[in-house]
Image (cartoon, grey):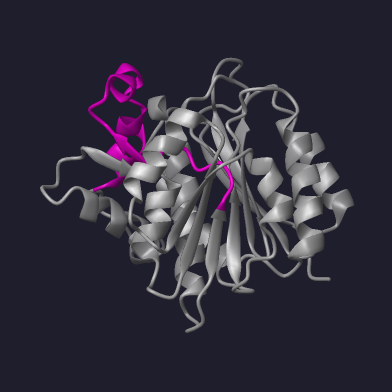
């Protein structure tokens, strides 16, 4: 899966990932103490939906383009509020031109006592990140292989935080790296919340990935998925999923209330669907 995110910014996979990320950050803000978000594969941080890349695929039109401005039930509106508020702030004239990557989304939700570590290996994207957050003392940008951050950057000195692992899946073995990375990170920051993204494709090996997560046995491991077309479709991205370790206790219920409507709005055929499942319960 060749995945330069500029082609896919704002698509249906981003909607799920960023809505959940925003909900988790908002939950952390319920306590006064500061926290740190560690984004291991941060990308450039922000996207121009009028760029050559975004126009080439137009994927955002089937994602955030359908969602923004839609009439929503109260439960869905409440769940999406932190995410959609940021998107609207970046587009004050109500015409979608900018889309936040995860670093910009997190930064817009942070308070003065919170911090962001944005880690990116790709040199060009790292330069974009540094420009985006130039002079911002609450953000640290590091040009580094994000998998290494799951060792050396944990635990955060704030002792509270969230780790987002959103690999590009440009090469084989990413599921194995997710398992290994979570195992290593958990030894250093066992109580921390983790959000791990993965694609849903016909041949992606998700069942084995989930089985290995169960074998790993991290307590409080939740999986949520959304697919917008028949998951047996052989070509392309059919959906995406998130592994959530130590998620907010309210998140599963919020997802079950909101995902039916979000799936309906973003569906590409009549085989679209969603699920929320506990892989490993409380220890």
* Residue segment shown in magenta: 39-68
Residue sitting farthest toward the bottom: 32
- Percent across and percent down for residue 6 are 39, 28
Viewer-proximal residue among 2 and 41: 41
Quadrant of residue 81 within the rendered picture:
bottom left
Q: Quadrant of the N terminus?
A: top right
Viewer-proximal residue among 40 and 201: 40
73 up-or-down from 177: above or below: below
Residue 267: in sight, yes or no? no
Residue sitting farthest toward the front: 135
1 up-or-down from 66: above or below: above
Residue at 44% from the left image edge and 75% from the top image edge: 113
Residue at 64% from the left image edge and 63% from the top image edge: 193
Q: Quadrant of the C terminus?
A: bottom right
140 up-or-down from 155: above or below: above
Quadrant of residue 22 within the rendered picture:
bottom left
Residue 93 vs residue 30: left or right?
left
Residue at 74% from the left image edge and 35% from the top image edge: 175
Quadrant of residue 57 within the rendered picture:
top left
């Amino acid at each position: 899966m060749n995945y330069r995110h500029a082609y896919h910014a704002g698509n249906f996979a981003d909607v799920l990932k960023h809505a959940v990320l925003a909900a988790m950050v908002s939950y952390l803000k319920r306590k006064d103490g500061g926290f740190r978000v560690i984004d291991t594969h941060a990308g450039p941080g922000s996207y121009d939906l009028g760029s050559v890349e975004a126009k080439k695929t137009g994927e955002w039109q089937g994602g955030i383009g359908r969602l923004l401005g839609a009439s929503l039930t109260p439960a869905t509106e409440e769940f999406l509020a932190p995410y959609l508020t940021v998107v609207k702030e970046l587009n004050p004239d109500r015409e979608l031109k900018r889309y936040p990557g995860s670093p910009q989304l997190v930064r817009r939700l942070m308070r003065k006592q919170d911090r962001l570590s944005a880690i990116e290996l790709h040199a060009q994207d790292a330069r974009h990140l540094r420009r985006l957050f130039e002079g911002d003392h609450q953000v640290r940008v590091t040009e580094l292989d994000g998998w290494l951050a799951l060792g050396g950057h944990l635990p955060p000195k704030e002792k509270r935080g969230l780790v987002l692992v959103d690999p590009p899946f440009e090469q084989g073995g990413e599921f194995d790296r997710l398992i290994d990375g979570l195992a290593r990170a958990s030894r250093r920051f066992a109580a921390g919340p983790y959000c791990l993204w993965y694609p849903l494709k016909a041949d992606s090996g998700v069942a084995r990935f989930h089985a290995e997560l169960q074998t790993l046995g991290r307590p409080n491991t939740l999986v949520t998925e959304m697919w917008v077309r028949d998951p047996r479709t052989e070509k392309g991205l059919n959906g995406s999923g998130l592994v959530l370790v130590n998620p907010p206790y309210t998140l599963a219920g919020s997802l079950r209330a909101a995902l039916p409507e979000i799936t309906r709005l973003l569906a590409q055929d009549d085989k679209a669907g969603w699920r929320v499942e506990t892989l490993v319960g409380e220890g």
